[in-house]
Amino acid sequence: MKKRLFVLWSVLLIGVVSLMAQDMPGGLATAFQEGNSQALGKYMHDEVNLMLVGKEAEVTKRANVEAAMRTFFIANKVKKFDVNHKGKRDESAFIVGTLHTSTGSYRVNCYLKRIGDNYLIHRIRIEKTND
């Protein structure tokens, strides 16, 4: 009986911890790693504030952001993506990483907002690093 009770409490604890750990989409880093703008689009809100290297920041529709990211990934073949920081507070989350490409390294900042049960990107900023 004690063994069953222990197993039941363990399963319950693991379930609660895993629900609390869902701070942002797991495939977000993978989409950057693969240079996949279409996969990245699945994690975007309907409108995103996009700031790409050398361009003015603009709020634009998801389809336009996907197209801009596709163009960026074509011009800058992705070698790897490292997550430097990520976090969550209340109704928002963020991920900061370094995107290593054929043309150099870029700092990527993604800010997400909780919409219903999901965290969706509402701002992407990509800047060239000095390395």
Image: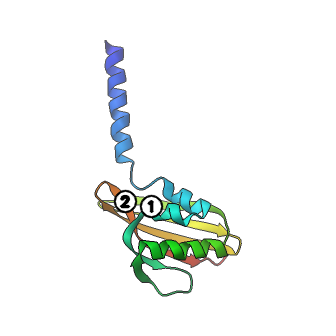
In the picture, residue 58 is in which quadrant? bottom left
The residue under label 1 is which amino acid type? Lys
Q: Give the image location of residue 67, x and y in percent.
A: 52, 74
| Quadrant housing the N terminus | top left
- Residue marked by disc 1: 42
The residue depicted at 56 percent of the width and 86 percent of the height is 54
- Residue marked by disc 2: 119
On screen, residue 103 above or below 121:
below
Q: Nearer the viewer, mark 1 or mark 2?
A: 1
Q: Is any atom of residue 55 visible in this view? A: yes
Q: Give the image location of residue 102, x and y in percent.
A: 71, 71
On screen, residue 40 above or below 7:
below
Q: Give the image location of residue 73, x and y in percent.
A: 61, 71
- Gap in angstroms between the C-alphas marked 1 and 2: 11 Å
Which callout, 1 or 2, points at the residue further toward the start of the chain?
A: 1
Front in this rendered view, residue 20 or 61 = 61
Classify mark 1: helix, strand or loop.
Answer: loop
Question: What colour scheme has been applied to the protein in the rendered image?
Answer: rainbow
The residue depicted at 36 percent of the width and 41 percent of the height is 17
On screen, residue 127 above or below 28:
below
On screen, residue 114 above or below 5:
below
The residue under label 2 is which amino acid type? Tyr
Q: Residues within 10 Å of mark 1 (few under 14, many from 20)?
A: some
- Image position of 129 (left or right of 116): right
The residue depicted at 54 percent of the width and 66 percent of the height is 37
Classify mark 2: helix, strand or loop.
Answer: strand
